[in-house]
Image (spheres, helix red, strand yellow):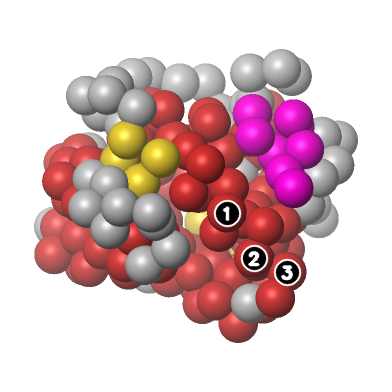
Amino acid sequence: MASTFQRDKVNLVFTAMDADGDGVLREDDFVALARRWASVRVAGDEDRLIAIMHGWWSTLAARSRDPRSVAVDDVLTVVDLLGQMPDAVTATADAMFEAVDEDGDGRISPVEYRLMIEAWNGRPTDTADAFARLDLDGDGIISRSEFARHWSEFWAGDDPAAPGAYVFGTPRAA
Ligand SMILES: [Ca+2]
Ligand SMILES: [Ca+2]
């Protein structure tokens, strides 16, 4: 069972993705998010972002009670299963890393990170504090291995103090 902290963490992402606020995610929400994200970037890779978000949608919808919509509890069901599917976590981490790394240089810069958070939140957001926590070795970028570690922690971990809790920005409780 997911803890209150895990539920809050997932709620933060869920609310950001539920653009029309009806309490469930549909395929359209994932496409809308990909479009919103692409629109704040110069890379012109909307199709790639849509494909990556579609992969997420498929993972969640496959385990949802209603395959056309996903509720918070469905997401938490998947979160409960993640411990048994480390390969899926790694694959999603890699796909997300590639999506965030807009210029494809193998590193997530502070600007690339901020654009992701702002696209997901739909508003300007100060991400300096969250970025500093995620940059474990303090070299000014988030490496692929730093991101993979945080990603697993975000979805599968239960430690509010872990830097991974900040993958999608500063949690509300912090
Ligand atoms: Ca980059
Ligand atoms: Ca780093």
Is residue 174 in the magenta section? no
**Image coordinates for residue 4, horizontal then vertical, percent:** 74, 30
| Span highlighted in magenta in the image | 1-8
Q: Which residue is drawn at 42% across and 47% down?
A: 112
Query: Mark 2 Cα within 10 Å, few/some/many (few <14, many 20+)?
Result: few
Marks 3/1 in contact by CB < 8 Å: the verdict is no
- Tell which of 107 and 99 is nearer to you: 99
**Image coordinates for residue 27, horizontal then vertical, percent:** 20, 51
Q: Residue at x 54, y 67 (%)?
A: 93
Marks 1/2 in contact by CB < 8 Å: the verdict is yes
**Image coordinates for residue 11, horizontal then vertical, percent:** 53, 31
* Residue 56 location, quadrant: bottom left
- Tell which of 75 and 126 is nearer to you: 75
Cα gap from disc 3 to disc 1, whole angstroms: 11 Å
Q: Which residue, as the protein is rendered here, is positioned at the far bottom?
A: 87
Q: What residue type is labelled 3?
A: Gly
Q: Which residue, as the protein is rendered here, is positioned at the far front?
A: 65
